[in-house]
Image: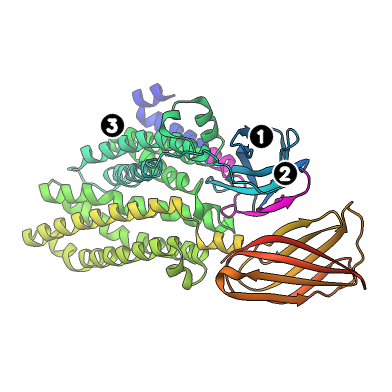
């Protein structure tokens, strides 16, 4: 089909373009999958810091959203790591088999999973069997340059999709007979083609927490292909290839390929990432798509337009007129889509200052305001004199467009930083999840759940059992929370029994985040009191 299209462009181009549209459309459809917030651990059995009288038969990890396990490791008190490969998953909960009896001392359960938005999440918890010992080192080593490489590859991919594909579209649809900037556009397209597979491999390294030395290993690439980012890389490669094809074909035949490449660039961005993973996806994915297409249209035209005007190439005025006529509605779409995504991701004004994601957004907004100011000046002050042939206005316009292009590249750098910062929306979802802990002695055990598991007004739910998992009918239960290192006196609340077999403490105010010591004073009879102790982590 490719050979036929190139030999007979007028007859084959439409069929080939349609086939490519169907191809990347199917890829985006099947690659989208289910996605939600950035995953976080909300419950663990045994709980972090738990002191157990006997080794558990299994471990259980419950997350705020469906996850896929990547690496599960148990580190014994002597520092010996053991890979855990026997587990079951129902999406949000991983039940992990304990391979053999555990020795006396403190163990570390290290986990690394990949969340539905395609980003890896890792952590570890400590528990002791029989007695507390020095916590063993997990031995995890992550190359300090890995995140820098991911960031740089992300920027290169943006350059390819926005400046390369967008530039190919501008040269095919907006430029007149004489056009400039072809070499720059080709360079950006090749940069993107190199960055797409490189970014995928780096994603595999990051997912496994592996160093650069393992980049060529099969497990790294198998892991990368199991993430949602594979669809972004694949559709991006299609877009970049079509952009190159649009530059070598005659202009009349190149237009369909350039248009499909622009659409594919938006689809690549919508296939994975924080914004695409947000709910409701019927809104967020189209907004990401429109935002990406709008950026590619605007940013991609800047360099070819500036070069064409500077060279005073034939048709430069036509290029400028077409771009200035189209940019106003494009900017309107960008503003609407960007505003919708920002509101969904940030949710509250305080999150703009209190979170890394919000601070990056503020920096981006400051640059965007400057960019819009330049664009407005170019559009309503300089464009008409430049179209009329005024040399001074044209030179000033070229310089202004060059500044626009520099600001755009800086914005790409900021946007690439979002790869490492969970949005406030995801943090809020995680904070709203309950936290739990399990406490036990030979006489009794209890499951304590605090909801939501964050600072503020919460409710505590207590389920009591005997040491052999039978029902425990207590006469009174008192919940005691303490954090002496913060200078807080113990918070004591008498629980009520609502009649469903549990005990509750409502309207409990927890003032600070961090690890709290928990004690349950259980009055079993007039002459017997059982005390259970544990710890619970309260989020900010």
Mark 3 or 2, closer to the camera: 2
Which percent across, then down, holds residue 289?
46, 52
Q: Which residue is mark 3?
A: 248
Q: Residue at x 10, y 57 (%)?
A: 395
Q: Marks 1 and 3, how far apart in space?
A: 53 Å
- Asked if the residues shown at circle 1 and circle 3 are in contact, with their CB atoms under 8 angstroms apart, the answer is no
Mark earlier in primary sequence (3, 2): 2
| Quadrant where the N terminus is found in the figure | top left
Q: Is residue 240 left or right of residue 488?
A: left
Answer yes or no: is residue 523 visible. Answer: yes
Q: Residue at x 51, y 35 (%)?
A: 224
- As helix, strand or loop, the secondary structure at mark 2 comes to strand
- Asked if the residues shown at circle 2 and circle 1 are in contact, with their CB atoms under 8 angstroms apart, the answer is yes
Q: Which residue is mark 2?
A: 59
Camera-nearest residue between 153 and 242? 153
Mark 1 or 3, closer to the camera: 1
Q: Marks 3 and 2, how far apart in space?
A: 58 Å
Q: Which portion, as a residue range, is magenta?
A: 26-54
Relative to 231, does residue 423 appear above or below in the rendering? below
Q: Marks 2 and 1, how far apart in space?
A: 10 Å
Which percent across, then down, holds residue 330?
36, 59
Q: Which residue is mark 1?
A: 84
How many discs mark residues in the rendered view? 3
Mark earlier in primary sequence (1, 3): 1
- As helix, strand or loop, the secondary structure at mark 3 comes to helix
Camera-nearest residue between 53 and 111? 53
Q: Residue at x 62, y 67 (%)?
A: 454
Indicate yes or no whether the magenta region holds residue 39. yes
Q: Residues within 10 Å of mark 1 (few under 14, many from 20)?
A: some
- Asked if the residues shown at circle 3 and circle 2 are in contact, with their CB atoms under 8 angstroms apart, the answer is no
């Amino acid at each position: 089909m490719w050979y036929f299209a190139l030999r007979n462009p007028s007859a084959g181009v439409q069929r080939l373009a349609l086939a490519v549209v169907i191809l990347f459309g199917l890829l985006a459809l099947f690659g989208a999958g289910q996605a939600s917030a950035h995953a976080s651990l909300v419950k663990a059995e045994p709980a972090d810091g738990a002191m157990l009288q006997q080794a558990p038969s299994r471990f259980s990890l419950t997350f705020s959203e469906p996850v896929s396990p990547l690496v599960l490791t148990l580190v014994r008190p002597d520092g010996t790591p053991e890979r855990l490969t026997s587990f079951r998953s129902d999406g949000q909960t991983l039940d992990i088999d304990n391979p053999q009896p555990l020795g006396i001392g403190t163990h570390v359960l290290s986990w690394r999973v990949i969340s539905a938005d395609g980003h890896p999440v890792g952590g570890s918890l400590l528990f002791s069997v029989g007695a507390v010992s020095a916590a063993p080192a997990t031995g995890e080593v992550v190359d300090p340059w890995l995140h820098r490489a991911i960031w740089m590859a992300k920027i290169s991919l943006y350059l390819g999709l926005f400046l390369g594909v967008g530039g190919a579209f501008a040269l095919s649809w907006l430029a007149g007979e004489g056009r400039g900037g072809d070499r720059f556009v080709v360079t950006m397209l090749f940069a993107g083609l190199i960055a797409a597979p490189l970014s995928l491999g780096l994603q595999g390294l990051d997912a496994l927490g592996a160093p650069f030395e393992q980049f060529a290993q099969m497990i790294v690439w198998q892991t990368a292909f199991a993430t949602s980012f594979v669809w972004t890389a694949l559709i991006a490669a299609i877009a970049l290839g079509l952009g190159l094809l649009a530059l070598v074909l005659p202009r009349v035949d190149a237009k369909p390929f350039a248009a499909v490449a622009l659409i594919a660039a938006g689809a690549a961005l919508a296939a994975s990432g924080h914004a695409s993973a947000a709910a409701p996806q019927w809104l967020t994915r189209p907004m990401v798509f429109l935002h990406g297409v709008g950026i590619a249209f605007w940013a991609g035209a800047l360099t070819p337009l500036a070069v064409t005007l500077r060279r005073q190439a034939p048709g430069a005025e036509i290029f400028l007129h077409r771009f200035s006529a189209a940019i106003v509605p494009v900017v309107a779409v960008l503003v609407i889509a960007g505003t919708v995504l920002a509101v969904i991701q940030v949710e509250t004004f305080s999150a703009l200052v209190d979170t890394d994601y919000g601070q990056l957004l503020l920096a981006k907004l400051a640059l965007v305001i400057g960019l819009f100011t330049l664009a407005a000046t170019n559009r309503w002050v300089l464009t008409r004199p430049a179209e009329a042939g005024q040399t001074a206005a044209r030179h000033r316009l070229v310089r202004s467009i060059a500044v626009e292009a520099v600001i755009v590249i800086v914005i790409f750098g900021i946007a690439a930083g979002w790869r490492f910062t969970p949005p406030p929306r995801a943090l809020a979802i995680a904070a709203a999840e309950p936290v739990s802990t399990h406490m036990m002695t030979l006489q009794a055990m209890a499951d304590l759940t605090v909801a939501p598991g964050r600072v503020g007004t919460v409710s505590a739910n207590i389920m009591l059992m005997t040491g052999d998992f039978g029902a425990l009918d207590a006469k009174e239960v008192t919940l005691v929370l303490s954090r002496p290192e913060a200078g807080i006196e113990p918070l004591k609340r008498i629980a009520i029994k609502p009649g469903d077999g549990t005990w509750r403490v409502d309207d409990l105010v927890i003032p600070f985040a961090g690890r709290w010591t928990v004690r349950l004073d259980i009055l079993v009879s007039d002459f017997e009191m059982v005390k259970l102790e544990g710890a619970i982590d309260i989020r900010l």
